[in-house]
Amino acid sequence: MSRIIDYHIHTSFSDGFFDPRDMIQAAAARGIQEVCITDHHSGWKPALSVLDLEEYFITLDEIRRQDSLGTEVFIGIEVDLSSIDSLFQLQEFQWDLILFEYVFAQSSWEKSFQQVLNFKKKNPDYKVGLAHARFTRVSESRIDYVLNKIQEFEIIIELNTRYGNYMDQWFNYLDSEYWYSIGSDAHHKDALGNTTLAINYLKQRNIPLDRVISL
Ligand SMILES: [Zn+2]
């Protein structure tokens, strides 16, 4: 990964402070070569509802076709499974990256995790990942099961610098068998490209940077 990437960015389509064009231009000015916009699809916070998905996708698609921006633009989405029941509508769009957040944050994580696996099984062409992955509620006896499924289904583990404390004990189990994504979770221009912590984690664990996905 010699490219400079940031695959987790929010805009005013959800709880970000700037519109997509401003964020992308700021990213280009910082020398970031590839960005993926990943606004929230959630029932709780300022987020895309099912009704907003089309406008969001079309707007970003228009922006990415303008090659004067100086950075390559991908279209992603961050889905909160604790407040979104149906993933049916998502399948109408050609997302470059679908991140699921809070999958292991609740005691009912088995159900959420199964939803992610089912979604990936039904839509094998999508790149599906765990946003700021933490294995908070996974017990020691279940971690092998979780990691085996992540590997089997090629679920991407996102290393997200905004959540510097995500590296719980299960992160010691991760190695070069898994796929990773890297993002800043920027809501503000200042945070764009802030991925050092994530890259350092990979280096410390001797995980080659070619295990970071390329969109
Ligand atoms: Zn986010």
Image (cartoon, helix red, strand yellow):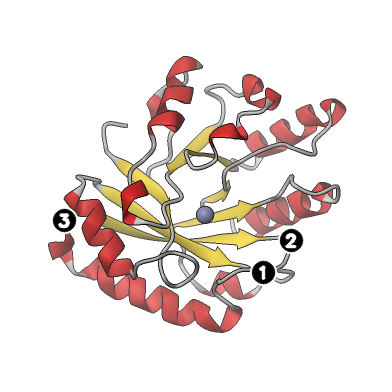
- Specify whether 192 is left or right of 207: left
Of pointers 1 and 2, the one earlier in the residue sequence: 1
Q: Element under label 2?
A: loop
Name which residue type carries label 2. Answer: Ser
Most extreme residue toward the bottom, as rendered? 51
Percent position (x, y) of residue 173? 65, 21
Of pointers 1 and 3, the one earlier in the residue sequence: 1
Marks 3 and 2 sit apart, C-alpha to C-alpha, by 36 Å
**Residue placed most toward the observer, 98 or 118:** 98
Q: Is the C-beta separation of discs 1 and 2 under 8 Å?
A: yes
| Residue occupying the point 79% across, 32% down | 145
Kindly report which numbered mark, 1 or 2, lies closer to the viewer in this rendering.
1
Residue 166 in view of the camera: yes
Find disc 1 in the rendering and name its residue. Answer: 44
Q: Element under label 3?
A: loop
Q: Element under label 1?
A: loop
Percent position (x, y) of residue 71? 22, 54
Q: Residues within 10 Å of mark 3 (few under 14, many from 20)?
A: some
Q: Is residue 187 above or below residue 167?
A: below
Find disc 2 in the rendering and name its residue. Answer: 82
Name the disc covering residue 70, or none.
3
- Specify whether 94 is left or right of 46: left
Residue 126 in view of the camera: no
Q: Is the C-beta separation of discs 1 and 3 under 8 Å?
A: no
Kindly report which numbered mark, 1 or 3, lies closer to the viewer in this rendering.
1
Q: Is residue 140 above or below residue 94?
A: above
Q: Is mark 1 within 8 Å of ligand 1?
A: no
Q: Is mark 3 within 8 Å of ligand 1?
A: no
Marks 1 and 2 sit apart, C-alpha to C-alpha, by 9 Å
